[in-house]
Amino acid sequence: MSTTDVPRVAAFREVTDKNGRVYRVGESDLDIMGRKRKWMVILPWIGMMGISSAEYAFASAEDTLHIAHSWNSLHIFWMMTVWIFFQAAVAFPAGKLRESGRLPARWAMMLGAAGTLMGYLSLAYAPHVIVAYVGFGMFSGMGAGMVYATCVNMVGKWYPERKGGKTGFVNGGFAYGSVPFVFLFTGYMDLTNFRWVLVGVGLLLAGVVAGAGYFFRDPPKNWWPAEVDPLNPPKDPRAARSMRMNPPAVHQYSPKEAWQTGRVALMWFCLACTSGVNIFGIAFQVDIGEEAGFAGGIVATAMSLKAIVNGTGRGVIGWLSDLYGRKRCLLAVCVILGLSQYGILWSAELKNLPLFLVFSSISGFGGGAIFPMFAALTADYFGENNNASNYGMVYSAKLVSGLGAGMGAVVVGAWGHSGAFVLAGSISLFAGCMALFLSPPGRDKDKRITPNPHPLGDETG
């Protein structure tokens, strides 16, 4: 180990702004963990890639699993719904354990790695569909939830002054990591090799998650980068603009306090709607493409484009939200996601492949971009100290939105793809209308419209 990997002891002091928020300053990233804080962006990004295939590539394995295990398609779609349910359900309790110190980040990642492996083993060897529901749906879902909550909240703690782009980049790993497995499950895996393919993928991804998580470390509570003055506009123009467009929370809200502001419930509803539309698109884009007569390889390409743009969209929208404001970008994303559902349906009915690929990519952008928006918005509104719990409350909306796969199958059966995609697009647009009412707690209307160039005040404690 080099000397740069050894944490240094440094003096720190606490300063207080005019809102009463406390900042711990004086310690650099090297002082705390012996390495640059950029590693707390790179490693969480890698960890997120390790769990993405379970959600984003699962639909590509449907045909093989259906024949190999004699599971009907409805079972498989509901299995994905169960996975999403447990992935979301674990976010809040895991956040509470993390913030109490009883679940260090490293161990949360190890549990996530174990759940990932169990999920793929159950898909390969489950003697009955119920075993797959438990092994993949419950254990893999819980493991992914541990990893997701840990990675997303880790980056916000290390970059409190410009979290949008960093959070978006890390969040993008949740889509990028699925790309090779979409092709693997669609074009290579078959009845002769599905078991060793699934076991091999499980071992690989579990190793990726565990290897990245081994080096995780949280900063101290209230930590603020030593090179950024928390009481005056930063010299770095990027950080200065981000803090002007997205002022830090007026204080560190507990989960109870955050809920009492009313913002958590509104964010929960908007995320439930938009995430449900995203999950519906992931589950049924393959089906509508095949119904339109597009070849399986082309549909797999469309899904891969969707995943790539989904991941890219998370990073791009995070960067844009630092420049133009989180809420403004969230509204744009809701509109883009909604209109793209109409576009996918239109292009499939026309049997126009280029348009299908374009709207698939746009849908991927919108579906991915919603998550870093809510993750960064939660920290902006309620602070970083309790962000794992606060975002856990917001992210629990996926408990409901996971029905986008299972209920989507019911709606498609009743109304066909036309009715289902029109409904999905309308739901996303309605969520955008509701997001208009979001506002940061503790700041008056004038400050929201014309951001204060000195949002943190000038008082020291």
Image: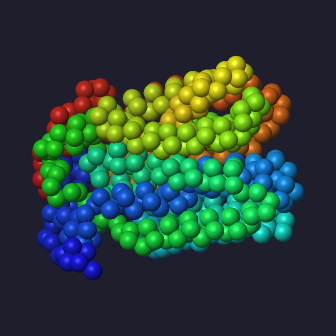
Which residue is rendered at x = 54% and y = 33% of the image?
A: 361
Image-quadrant location for residue 430: top right
Observer-nearest of 449 and 161:
161
Q: Quadrant of residue 330?
A: top left
Residue displayed at 50% across by 67% down: 208
Q: Quadrant of the N terminus?
A: bottom left
Answer above or below: position of 341 versus 303.
Answer: above
Instruction: From this view, report whether residue 456 is shown above or below residue 195.
Output: above
Q: Position of residue 129 (x, y in %)?
A: 82, 61
Tell me if residue 370 can be seen. Answer: no
**Quarter occupied by residue 191:** bottom right
Residue situated furthest right in the rendering: 70
Residue at 82% x, 53% y is 66
Expressed as whole percent of the image width and height from the top left, the position of residue 307 reads: 55, 43
| Residue 120 against residue 416 in the figure, above or below | below
Report the front residue among 394 and 108.
108
Q: What is the x, y in percent for residue 460?
A: 12, 53
